[in-house]
Amino acid sequence: MSALATMRANNDLDAMPQPAVALRTHTESDDRDPAMHRHRKGQLVVALRGSVICEVPTGYWMVPPQCGVWIPGCVKHSMRAAAGTELYLLCVEPSAAALPAECCTLAISPMLREMIVHLAAQPQDYATDSGTARLVAVLLEELARMQVEQLYFPISEHPKLRKLANALLRAPSDRRTAQEWAAWLAMSERTLSRLVLSETGMTFGRWRQQLQIIVALRWLYAGTQVQRVAEDLGYESVSAFITMFKKALGATPSKYLATA
């Protein structure tokens, strides 16, 4: 059984009455949930090392080490983690904190990160008047103050857009034009462009670039060299990839990773 499956099998999240509990797992190899699922509790997905991509019906969210992805309660989701990922889940009762009603990326302060790590080492059935309960109260108060950020590849439940998104995720180096992708989907280029814009709020080119950023970050956090990432994403040169990355995220790959 995979690390993600074992973690879920050993913990019935919705049966725990505590306002928040934390779980930890480590993936020895690439791992993923077999299917989408949901819980009453919301989940903050935090990766101390490695990388995780969370899939929800409306898109893919990247979990970099300095951030966490918030998935509200009852939202269908699945996760895929790279080999060597140290993963924490902070599972929160819906009424326990004023957290966003939509999926989002939250900045995680060093103090908050250490509190989550500490909570994961404590018994889950802590009493309401215990030190752990007091820690949880402070943790949730701090979490509600964290800044919302975006490392997100939007999709939709439109079958053709999801088919295209899955194809791009399987082969992010595929450099087919919008016209060629449209022919593959049996529609006109104009129809595809309108569909992507109406469903995601992005042009086709910006939308595909956003996916490449998500994939690039996943590979970079897993230790892949910048040159290899540029090649595997189909860029003609490393400098072209670095220029795209800096324009999108405000820093070169090396400087961006140094802040993690």
Image (cartoon, rainbow, N blue to C red):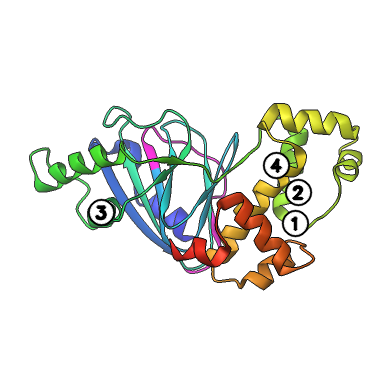
Residue 172 picture location, percent across and down:
73, 55
Query: In this image, 74 relative to 252: left or right?
Result: left
Q: CA distance from mark 1 to mark 4?
A: 15 Å
Q: Which mark is residue 111?
A: 3
Query: In this image, 16 relative to 31: left or right?
Result: left
The amino acid type, in three-letter code, at marker 4 is Trp
Badge 3 marks a residue whose secondary structure is: helix
Residue 22 picture location, percent across and down:
30, 49
**Mark 2 = which residue?**
167
Mark 1 crowd level (few <14, some 14–19, many ≥20, 10 Å Cα):
few
Residue at 15% of width from left, 47% of height from top? 132
Q: Which mark is residue 29?
A: none
Magenta stretch secondary structure, dominant: loop
Residue at 59% of width from left, 71% of height from top? 224
Q: Quadrant of residue 74?
A: top left
Asked whether disc 2 touches disc 1, contact meaning CB atoms under 8 Å apart, the reply is yes
Q: CA distance from mark 3 to mark 4?
A: 34 Å
Is residue 155 at all visible to an observer of this figure? yes
Badge 4 marks a residue whose secondary structure is: helix
Is residue 157 at all visible to an observer of this figure? no
